[in-house]
Image: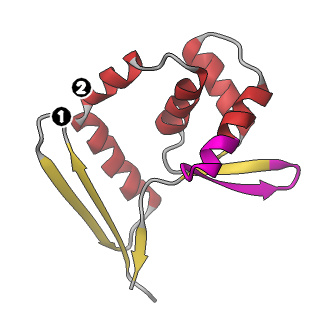
Amino acid sequence: MTKKRIRIDMEDADGARYDIKLEGNVTRDKVLKIFEMMDLMNIEEEEEQSIKMDSVGSKIWHIVDKFFPMGKFTSTNILEKYEDEFNEPVKLSVISTYLSRFASKGRVERVRTGREWTYQSIKITQKQQ
C-alpha cells in the first residue's frame, strides 16, 4: 500500500509562512481540520474577501470555497447555498455558466454524472510514493 502525503504551504497577512505536512493515513476529516485551522489563522484575509464580492462570479466562488472546499457538488447545491447566503435570487443557468468557466480555468474539476455535471475544487496536490 502506498503512503499518502499532502503538503500545504501558506502565508498569513503578517507575512508569516506555514508549512503543513500530512503523511500516512490521510483522511478527509484530517484535511478538513487543517482547513479549519487555516481559516482561524486567516480571519483578516477572509474579511477582505467579503468586501471584494461585487460580482456574481466572485459570490459563486465564495460559495464554492466556503461550503465545498473538498467535497463534490452540483450547480443546484450552489444555487441553494447562494440564495441562503446572499438572500438574492440567481438563475441556475448563470451558476452553470460560471462553474463551466471555473472548470475551463482549472479552478474546479468537472465530471458528467448521469444527467448533470458534478464539480470538485482543485486546491491541494496529493503525491503518492
> Is 105 part of what is drawn in magenta?
yes
Q: Position of residue 63 (x, y in %)?
A: 54, 31
Q: Residue furthest top?
A: 87
> Is 85 part of what is drawn in magenta?
no
The residue indicated by pointer 2 is 44
Q: Which of marks 1 and 2 is nearer the N terminus?
A: 1
Q: Position of residue 39 (x, y in %)?
A: 31, 37
The answer to whether the residue labelled 1 contacts the one labelled 2, judged by CB atoms less than 8 Å apart, is yes
Q: Position of residue 95 (x, y in %)?
A: 70, 31
Tell me the quarter of the image containing the C terminus.
bottom left
How packed mark 2 is, by other alpha carbons closer than 10 Å (few <14, some 14-19, many 20 or more), is: few
Quadrant of the rendered image containing residue 42:
top left
Instruction: Report helix, strand or loop for mark 2.
Output: helix
The vertical placement of 8 against 36, above or below, is: below
Left or right of 128, for residue 67: right
The residue indicated by pointer 1 is 13
Q: Nearer the viewer, residue 79 or 12?
A: 12
Which amino acid type is shown beneath numbered disc 1? Ala
Q: Nearer the viewer, residue 18 or 23?
A: 18
How packed mark 1 is, by other alpha carbons closer than 10 Å (few <14, some 14-19, many 20 or more), is: few
Residue at x-position 54% and y-position 42% = 68
Which amino acid type is shown beneath numbered disc 2? Glu
Residue at x-position 82% and y-position 47% = 116
Residue at x-position 46% and y-position 58% = 28
The vertical placement of 126 against 41, above or below, is: below
Q: In this figure, which colouring scheme has been used for the structure?
A: secondary structure
Residue bounds of the magenta highlight: 100-116
Left or right of 103, for residue 39: left
Q: Which residue lies furthest to the right in this view?
A: 115
